[in-house]
Structures are given as structure tokens and as C-alpha cells.
């Protein structure tokens, strides 16, 4: 990634992961600026990564070519209005990682005409294994798209979507997705215990199986359906288990769950975008 000045407003978990990822990729720490209202968080980041720290959000905007807005969605409207003048003057690329905040709402709060990339990462970004959906508004140049993509690639894989509304599907799939896998892991662990395994053994087996299955799926040419068929021998244990899952409506439940998450994402975006 070309080494422009990158700013972060909000020094929470996500900003910390992105900064850690950038520095691990060789990004110069002295070209990273961070602001937060909590000076304790700022000092910890400075000690850990030797980045510039600020308590003035506008100072970060004025110093940077790319500014990541990494505050909670409910804090975004206030923050955007606070930095609007500096954004109009400096015209940096704004990358918002706040779940549910639509580009048009953010642009309106920023006073119009801002280059905005909206990113929807997920929690495995905290361990550099995230999956992020990205969308850019019409003001974003090809160079700025590359910059945003490189930034998010520092914490995992990235995919661009053509229409911003598709980020609601990304939210339902990968945004909320880690929790679906945790639920499956929780249920498998309970079942393992019920079948007589010690809790620590059941947990380790489940966690390593989830990791192994994900690695196989990522590395194999075959899709997950094909991989499943390959390990399902006729008359065997896997076949018996999968038949029970199918009978219980497993696929239908997943489809209904994702549709519900999708609708909820649309509702939340609408609420978050309302002016007070
Ligand atoms: N964590 C994830 O895995 C994840 C995944 C997907 C998307 N996201 C998105 O990423 C964003 C950040 O999440 P996070 O977990 O990193 O949140 P977080 O830990 O709460 O970090 C946000 C930080 O910003 C500070 N802040 C709030 N208002 C501010 C302002 N006006 N100026 C400067 N700093 C301000 C907060 O201070 P206070 O604590 O004092 O309010 C807090 O330190 C959220 O919008 C979330 O939707 C996170």
C-alpha cells in the first residue's frame, strides 16, 4: 500500500486491530494518527505502536489523506458533524467501519460531496482473520479504492459489492456469521459432553474441527457441498447425522435466520440514519 497519512477516529478494538495489521504489513507507524476521547486508550496505542496521538478529531482529518471512522454507529452522526468543516477543506477519503451507517446519511452529516468507502468487517478481524464487504460512493477514485482495500486486507479478506444495499446481505452473512458458527460449536460441544467426553476435550475437538473444516474449504478446489459429500460415506456415521439435521430443517432454519438478520440490518440502518 502506498504510504499516505492514515488517521483513525475512535481508538477501540477495531482501530487497534487495523493498526496492528498495518504495522505487521510494514506500514510506517509515524504515518498513522489516532484520536479518541479516552486518553488512556490513546496512550496504550502509542506505547504499543508508536503512532501519533491526538485528542482533537479535526487535527487528524487535517493531517490525513485517509480517515477511518471507527466509533460506534450511535456515535457517528455527532462525530461526522464535528469534523464536517475539516473534511470539506482537506477532502480525505473517509472509510467508515460503523455497522449500518449508510453512505448518504454520513455524507449529509459531513455536509455533502465526500469520498466515502463503507466497510463491513467482522469480529475475526481482531485476530487478522476477518471478512470485510466494501462499497464505495461515486466520489471515490480508483486510487482511493485501492487504499481502502489495502487497509482492510491488513485484517483479513475483502470483497467489493456493486450496490450499497448488498452490505445488508454481507451483514447477515459474514457480519453476524461468526455467532452462527459459535452457536454450532456450542451445540456440538454440549452434545460431546452428553456423549461422555470431558468438557475440555469436547471443546478442543470442536474448535480444532471448525478450524480444520474452514482451512480445508479455503484450500480445496471443491465447494463445501462437494467436500461434505466426499466425507459422507453411504451407511456411515456422517450420513446418519446429516439425515437427522435435514429432517430437523437445518437448511431452512439457516435461510430464515439470514433473512431475519438481513431485514434487521435494513431496519437498523434506517433508524441510525434519522436526524434527531
Ligand atoms: N469490533 C468488531 O469486530 C467490529 C466488527 C464490525 C464492525 N465494527 C464497527 O467498528 C466500529 C468500532 O467498533 P469497536 O468495537 O472498535 O468500538 P469501541 O471499542 O467502542 O471503539 C470506539 C472508540 O471511539 C471512541 N469515541 C466515541 N465517540 C468519539 C468521538 N466523538 N471522538 C473520538 N472518539 C470517540 C470511544 O470512546 P468511548 O468508549 O468513551 O465511547 C471508543 O474508545 C463500530 O462502529 C462497529 O460497528 C466493529
Image (spheres, helix red, strand yellow):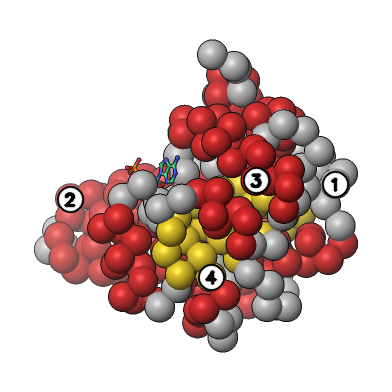
The location of residue 3, given as percent across then percent down, is: 68, 78
Circle nearer the N terminus (2, 3): 3
The location of residue 238, given as percent across then percent down, is: 46, 59
Q: CA distance from mark 2 to mark 3?
A: 60 Å
Which residue does the numbered mark 2 point to in the structure image?
194
Is label 4 or label 3 in front? Answer: 3
| 41 to the left or right of 223 | left
Q: CA distance from mark 3 to mark 1?
A: 17 Å
Q: CA distance from mark 4 to mark 3?
A: 18 Å
Is label 1 or label 2 in front? Answer: 1
Look at the picture and state if 233 lies above or below 194. Answer: below
Which residue does the numbered mark 1 point to in the structure image?
139
Identity of the residue drawn at 29% across and 67% down: 44
Q: Residues within 10 Å of mark 4 (few under 14, many from 20)?
A: many
Which residue does the numbered mark 4 point to in the structure image?
32
The reply to whether callout 1 and callout 2 are in contact (CB within 8 Å) is no
| 51 to the left or right of 162 | left
Identity of the residue drawn at 45% across and 73% down: 51
Circle nearer the N terminus (3, 1): 3
Circle nearer the N terminus (1, 2): 1
The location of residue 263, given as percent across then percent down, is: 61, 24
Is label 4 or label 1 in front? Answer: 4
Q: Is mark 4 within 8 Å of ligand 1?
A: no
Which residue does the numbered mark 3 point to in the structure image?
86
Amino acid at each position: 500500500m502506498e504510504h499516505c497519512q492514515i488517521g483513525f477516529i475512535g481508538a477501540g478494538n477495531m482501530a487497534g486491530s487495523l493498526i496492528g495489521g498495518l504495522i505487521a504489513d510494514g506500514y510506517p507507524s509515524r504515518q498513522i494518527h489516532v484520536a479518541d476521547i479516552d486518553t488512556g486508550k490513546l496512550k496504550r496505542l502509542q506505547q504499543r505502536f508508536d503512532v501519533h496521538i491526538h485528542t482533537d478529531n479535526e487535527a487528524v482529518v487535517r493531517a490525513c489523506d485517509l480517515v477511518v471512522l471507527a466509533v460506534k454507529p450511535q456515535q457517528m452522526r455527532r462525530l461526522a458533524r464535528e469534523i464536517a468543516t475539516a473534511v470539506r477543506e482537506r477532502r480525505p477519503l473517509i472509510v467508515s467501519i460503523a455497522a449500518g451507517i449508510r453512505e448518504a446519511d454520513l455524507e449529509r452529516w459531513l455536509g455533502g460531496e465526500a469520498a466515502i468507502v463503507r466497510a463491513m468487517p467482522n469480529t475475526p478481524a481482531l485476530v487478522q482473520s476477518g471478512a470485510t464487504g466494501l462499497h464505495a460512493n461515486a466520489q471515490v477514485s480508483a486510487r482511493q479504492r485501492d487504499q481502502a482495500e489495502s487497509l482492510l486486507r491488513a485484517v483479513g479478506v475483502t470483497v467489493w459489492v456493486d450496490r450499497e444495499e448488498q452490505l445488508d446481505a454481507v451483514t447477515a452473512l459474514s457480519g453476524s456469521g461468526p455467532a452462527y458458527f459459535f452457536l454450532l460449536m456450542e451445540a456440538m460441544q454440549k452434545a460431546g459432553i452428553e456423549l461422555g467426553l470431558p468438557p475440555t476435550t469436547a471443546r478442543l475437538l470442536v474448535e480444532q474441527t471448525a478450524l480444520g473444516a474452514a482451512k480445508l474449504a479455503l484450500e480445496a478446489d471443491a465447494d463445501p457441498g462437494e467436500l461434505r459429500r466426499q466425507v459422507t460415506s453411504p451407511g456411515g456415521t456422517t450420513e446418519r447425522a446429516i439425515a437427522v439435521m435435514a429432517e430437523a430443517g437445518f437448511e431452512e432454519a439457516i435461510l430464515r435466520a439470514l433473512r431475519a438478520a438481513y431485514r434487521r440490518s435494513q431496519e437498523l440502518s434506517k433508524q441510525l440514519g434519522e436526524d434527531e
